[in-house]
Image (cartoon, rainbow, N blue to C red):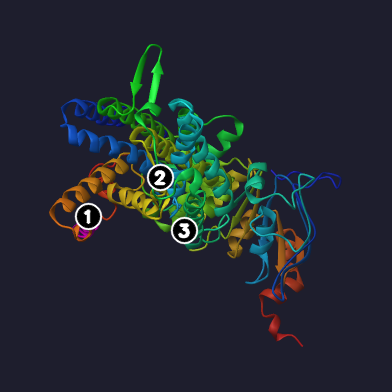
Amino acid sequence: MSGGVSARVWALHLAVIAALLAAGFLLPEYHRGVFARILVLAVFAMGYNLLIGYAGLLSLGHAMFFAAGLYGAGLPVYHLGWGVLPAFAAGIAAGGALALVIGALALRTVGVAFMIVTMMFSQVVYLTTLYFTTWTRGEEGLVLSPAMRRIDLGGAALSLSDPVARYMIALFLFSVVLLLSLRLVRSPFGRTLVGIRENEERMRMLGYDTFRAKLAAVVVSGLACGAAGAAWGLMFGYVGSGFASIQYSILPLLWVLVGGAATTLGPLLGTAFMFYVVDYASGLTSAYLLLVGAALILTVLFFPRGVLGTMRERWLKWLP
Amino acid sequence: MAALASPTETPLIETRALSRGFGGLKAVDNVDFRLRAGEIRALIGPNGAGKTTLVGLICGRIAPSCGTILFQGRDITRLPAHARVMAGIAYTFQITSIFPKLSAYDNVALPVQRRLLAQGRARAHDLDAGVAEALEKVGLCGRASTPAGDLAYGHQRLLEVAMGLALKPRLLILDEPTQGLSDGEIETFVALARAIAGEATVLIIEHNMQVVMELAQTITVMNAGRILAEGTPEAIRADRAVQDVYLGGHGHG
């Protein structure tokens, strides 16, 4: 009820992380690879969830923050020969900086206008990646060779193209963002965002500078999405315009809504579910989107607030 | 309880030539209004007299067309609403404005947290204590975990007052707090308002004349955007102009 995170909630989140750690050793090669991708994309979804779930801001342009991280990390590696760690930091910073600028502009609007403005800005970023094709190679994209994706640790080198290392790094990033987001949503800041989502005018009349709080939420969201984009580029070695396209603005929306908006673990669940539905359906038929659509309709029918959101509503009130 | 104000004392709130028009209508027209610290002031007048607009200007929900607003002698005309709240002006809405999906605890935790953050940081322990204190004052302690939207209407109004109190304001503006309450609930409210007046100045918009006469030390009567009369309850009751407005000004001429 009150602030803070209870022992039960900590235990649940640590158990999820422990299970994922065990999965890293137990899963067959193929699924370990899939899960490494899911974990990175779940970070993207968690960043998105902070805005749509907690602050109630529906952005249709989050591909731009993922792309900012992707290019913010990828371009310096490819063109300037930066190391992995500074490039990763640059990717996060690019996501945060872009979010600060876009947030300051887009937050002058609300509701449908906010959706359209964020979508337009995201298209601008997408077209920008195509325009500067000399550096980005546009749709074809840049391939970061395994040699560019090594972290030197004294004598030993950690290669990000090694599947086990990749899984563990993805899990590490996921865990850090998960635990930070858990802390954040249970903090005064998280409570403030929920208040704004529920009744912004009242929050203003309770002394909250709601614009600043929403801008802070956009920036934190941009940092998380930037981290996901940077990690994707560095771990999987591909940096292309496709990730800035509208599809990557809609996907996190689906992942979050399926898993449960405003739940800490919903983004992971939604991302994994959608990833596997697409994976399985595309193995059955070329019209796999039909099956994906049917799966989505069934989910919404039985879990109108997403899987975890509906479970919280009905059975597990304590779920964060 | 009322502070005996000397003429030189700085008023808590002072408006100078304050106006606000909506289209062709002057909702508040050149109003000079003064409120002493420590009093309970009632603001009355027929519908459309400009009462809600005037308090909206004072708390910053509405921007003035022209004029000045001073709070404790400081010009706050350009201060945004949230900053005025932090300066000590709390407003409770005419139409109940709570967070219906959040628990009563969380509704009150938001203003408590805002006050604590302004002082430093919001520790869970201080937050709990602040919420308990505010809920206790309005008698909603037992309902802390109930979603605010599930509370009875009268309790929602009290919750809204608790949210205002939780800010520990210097000035609490109550906009028609007894609207829709039962007689028993109104009695509880009058007692609560008296208790609040020990800690804060209260400016109350009210239609229930019994409540006004029981509570207010001074009454300000508005009509057509202007202040028509101001004085003690007895003086207002005897005022001809006020009687005309309330008892059928149409019959004139």
Q: Kindly identify the amino acid type of the residue bearing the numbered disc 2.
A: Gly
Q: Name the residue under label 2.
A: A141
Q: Name the residue under label 1.
A: A299
Which residue is more in the foreground, A170 or B185? Answer: A170
Residue sitting at 29 percent across and 26 percent down? A168
Image depth: mark 3 or mark 2 in front: 2
Q: Where is residue B95 in the image (x, y as percent from the top left)?
A: 52, 61
Image depth: mark 3 or mark 1 in front: 3
Q: Position of residue A214 (x, y in %)?
A: 52, 46
Q: Pinpoint the chain carrying mark 3.
A: A
As helix, strand or loop, the secondary structure at mark 1 comes to helix
Q: Kindly identify the amino acid type of the residue bearing the numbered disc 3.
A: Met
Which residue is more in the foreground, A6 or A266? Answer: A266
Residue A146 located left or right of residue A227: left
The region drawn magenta spans A291-303
In the rendered image, residue A247 lying in the magenta stretch gets the answer no
Q: How crowded is mark 1: few (under 14 residues within 10 Å), some or many (20 or more)?
A: some
Q: Is the magenta stretch mostly helix, strand or loop?
A: helix
Quadrant occupied by the C terminus of chain A: top left
CA–CA distance in space, label 1 to label 2 = 35 Å
Which residue is more in the foreground, B65 or B206? Answer: B65
Can residue B41 be seen at all in this image of the molecule? yes
Residue sitting at 44 percent across and 44 percent down? A67
Earlier residue among tags 1 and 2: 2
Can residue A213 be seen at all in this image of the molecule? no
Image depth: mark 1 or mark 2 in front: 2
Q: Name the residue under label 3.
A: A115
